[in-house]
Amino acid sequence: MLNFEFKNPVKIIFGKGQIAKIAQEIPADARVLLLYGGGSIKSNGIYDQVMSALTGFDVTVFGGIPANPEYEVLLRALNVIKSNHITYLLAVGGGSVIDGTKFLSAAALYQGEEPWDILKNKIRTDKGMPFGTVLTLPATGSEMNSGAVITRAATQEKLGMGGPGLFPEFSILDPLVVKSVPQRQLANGITDAFTHVLEQYMTYPAQAFLQDRFAESIMQTLVEIAPRIQKDPADYEAAANFMWCCTMALNGLIQKGVPTDWSVHAIGHELTANFGIDHARTLAIIVPVHYRYNFETKKEKLAQYAERIWGIKEGTPEQKAEQAIIRTESFFHSLGIDTKLSKYTDDYQGTAEQIEARFIERGWLGLGEHKTIKPDDVRKIVQLSY
Ligand code: NZQ
Ligand code: ZN
């Protein structure tokens, strides 16, 4: 097991009817900016619950943060923060609204000229404007971590940011919100969380027995509840387990003491930036080809995963590992998710070369748990996904 430090300060308030507790978490004299997305919270009743919990607070509202939170839109919110002397942010939404809020938390206190530099120059945020979240869509884990991913349409970029100052102060996880989530987003949420676990697990054995079993238990639970939640998003027990799996998949715990490989996300973000493909779907496109391409370095963990998640007991370790990739792809298909780039766009020729060039330009010259996946390998992986 590798050495590690672990600190996660987010207060989780989990369960039915917990949105009403917001008021206890925000200072009474705060000037609050409530941020939301395209309007689902208006039709499913979450907005009304939040507003009623905020009775007596000084609240300004900013809606319209799109999926894959867009820099230009966030700059408008930043103006509101400055002109209204906002002191506290409240994100009500999925990963996009929460990530957008994290960007604003950093940008509100940022001293530089151009807030995009926070992303471009990878500036770590040690102190941001305080914020809380009300999660409406289980998927990203953003509600309990300190990272965010922001899109800039003008330059077709999608870049990450973060820092210890960007943990939410609190996050309300009420599984009742899941009942209005559309099928497409349920499938995305399961796929995203499942891949988060894979990225922190599918490397090489590190003698971290507990971390492996944490990771495996999340994947097993997601596989178990996926058909239930897709059949009936109002199934509270399935929704509660789905939500907690998604949060636990990316709150930092399972990656402590083990090697990680975030290549699938790094490549996937480029596919979203280029084609607007939903985040989770880009992961499903890259996972199978990434594991095939890097089979030799990952086969021991692939075989362990084959046995423990998919119950594959027969065959050599290589055969089990190969079966593991096939079963993973079938799992994504069972959710209604395509795993080939050509299923999402006809315009895919040249994508691999473009991503290779971008990685070279950014100096991303060695990805993966061994830092040996070069831009040239990335090009070949993307070509395999066509
Ligand atoms: O915008 P509204 O109208 O609210 O509709 C949203 C949106 O269209 C809808 N939705 C959310 N909750 C709902 C609902 N519809 C009905 N009922 C509800 N209760 O779902 C759509 C998608 O929402 P979005 O927030 O975009 O989805 P998700 O949570 O999957 O977030 C994706 C973003 O998070 C980033 C992704 O790159 C992407 O930009 N990620 C953030 C991470 C992090 N901060 O740790 C890690 C992830 O790997 C990921 O990169
Ligand atoms: Zn993800």
Image: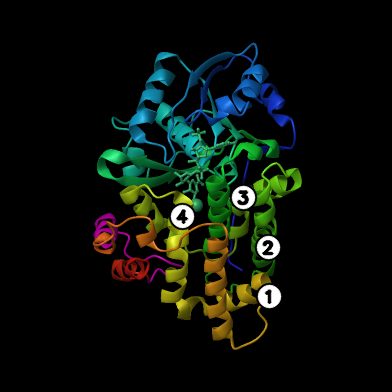
Q: Distance between the Cα atoms at labels 2 and 4? A: 20 Å
In the figure, 287 relative to 99: above or below? below
Sequence order check: which comes first, mark 1 or mark 3? 3
Q: Distance between the Cα atoms at labels 1 and 2? A: 11 Å
In the image, 317 versus 366, the foreground residue is 317
Which residue is outermost to the front? Answer: 231
**How far across and down, in percent of the image, does residue 327 sit?**
57, 71
In the figure, 327 relative to 53: above or below? below
Which stretch appears magenta? 354-372
Q: What label sits on residue 311 in the rendered view?
A: 1
The kind of residue on which mark 1 rests is Gly
Sequence order check: which comes first, mark 1 or mark 4? 4
Query: In the displayed structure, does residue 384 sit left or right of residue 93?
Result: left
The residue positioned 32% from the left and 40% from the top of the image is 152
Which residue in the structure is indicated by mark 2? 220
Q: Distance between the Cα atoms at labels 4 and 3? A: 16 Å
Instruction: State which mark lies toward you, 1 or 3.
Output: 1
Which residue in the structure is indicated by mark 3? 246
Disc 4 secondary structure class = helix
Does the segment drawn in magenta span residue 360? yes
